[in-house]
Amino acid sequence: MAFALRSTIQALQPDLVAWRRDFHRYPELGFREHRTAQQIAERLTQWGIPHRTGVAKTGIVAEIAGTKPVARPKVLALRADMDALPIQEDNRDISYSSLQAGLMHACGHDGHVAIALGTAQYLWQHRERFGGTVKILFQPAEEGPGGAQPMIEAGVLNDPPVDGILGLHLWNNLPLGTVGVRSGPLMAAVETFECEILGKGGHGAIPQQTVDAVVVGSQIVMALQAIVSRNVDPLQAAVVTVGSFHAGTACNVIAGHAKLQGTVRYFDPNLADLLGRRITETIAGVCAAMEARYHLDYRKLYPATINDPTMAELVRSAALSVVETPLGVVPECQTMGGEDMSYFLQAVPGCYFFLGSAKAPRTYPHHHPRFDFDETALAAGVEIFVRCVENFCG
């Protein structure tokens, strides 16, 4: 696959692959990325790049000041998430498979760190090509419980204040040689709920003496399906999913207890209060009608990932100059997946985009135990970041 890469960035490809594979062998969960952070800090120190460690526990912030004279120096932040997932890797035919039992980089964050390191090294060596300042944020815990907000609270967007922020996600849902970028909502808000239904158990042959938690839970599941179809504009996108339903122990015993777990996804921030409220009202109404009690734990995790139009155009322009396939830039690439990059985008104008990385001939999806991506995309990610820096910072 051909990319329009400058020779100095193309020459980084072997190092990018080596770094990525090292991180892949040693995955770490959120806020426990101690080895990962140490490896990043050691390379930044070796290159002489100023940086802070221990930001929001395991995060790192590198700061590179350009030397090109500009009328108004700007500050651009680049974000890379570092954490892995609690998944047992099943890639037995690769030399860099995870060495940590039950842990795996199954979403591409190892590649994100490698791209950010390559970008940092290139920018440090070519400071004359841009003015202003570039902050590179190595963020912990994107997969949970969320490291973006703690980094913001630690002041990473201040001193000097950030004018814009960019981030990328290697994306196996797009073919290699494409970039997914759009203004407005890219990824969905993520909310979860857990509902415990308290009925009254008894004998399966004497139902009149019971309050059947299975029946109550089933009514709730079906009633929740009407929330989107009858409360949300059909031209908008939203999802209410009950993914877990546990109740009962035997065929002739009516369960007095059931537990439901689900997730809520949407793009429009105006739906934030509506969906949670209607879920609460629906559960309360069904339980009242069927004489059951309930406990509901409703949690808002990440808001929608919404790109600033100007920053999205910055990425689109850079991507068009790098990708060389008929598909090129894919503008309509939304997903109901969520991202805590959304917190950065709420704080400053920015853009989050997808870098196609599907690995032929077999492409496994993100969070799959056999997930892998085409490492050719690594140098392309560096090139796009660098061109965005040069255009944004003059």
Image: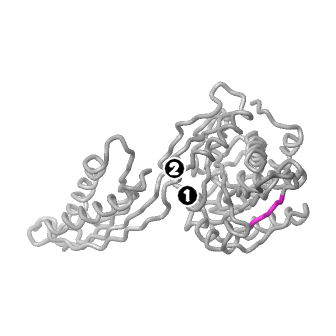
The quarter holding residue 278 reads bottom left
Q: Which residue is disc 1 drawn over?
A: 342
Residue at the spot x=86%, y=62% of the render? 43
Q: Which residue is disc 2 drawn over?
A: 187
Is residue 5 in sight in this rendering? yes
Q: Is residue 62 magenta?
A: yes
Q: Magenta segment range? A: 61-65
Q: Quadrant of the N terminus?
A: top right
In this rendered view, identify the residue nearer to me: 103 or 390: 390
In the image, residue 350 above or below residue 176:
below
Q: Is residue 52 magenta?
A: no
For the residue carrying disc 1, how many other residues have a C-alpha within 10 Å: few (<14), some (14-19), or many (20+)? many
Q: Nearer the N terminus, badge 1 or badge 2?
A: 2
Residue 157: x %, y % from top left: 67, 66
Residue at the spot x=63%, y=47% of the render? 311
Query: What residue type is disc 2 on?
Result: Met
Majority secondary structure of magenta residues? strand
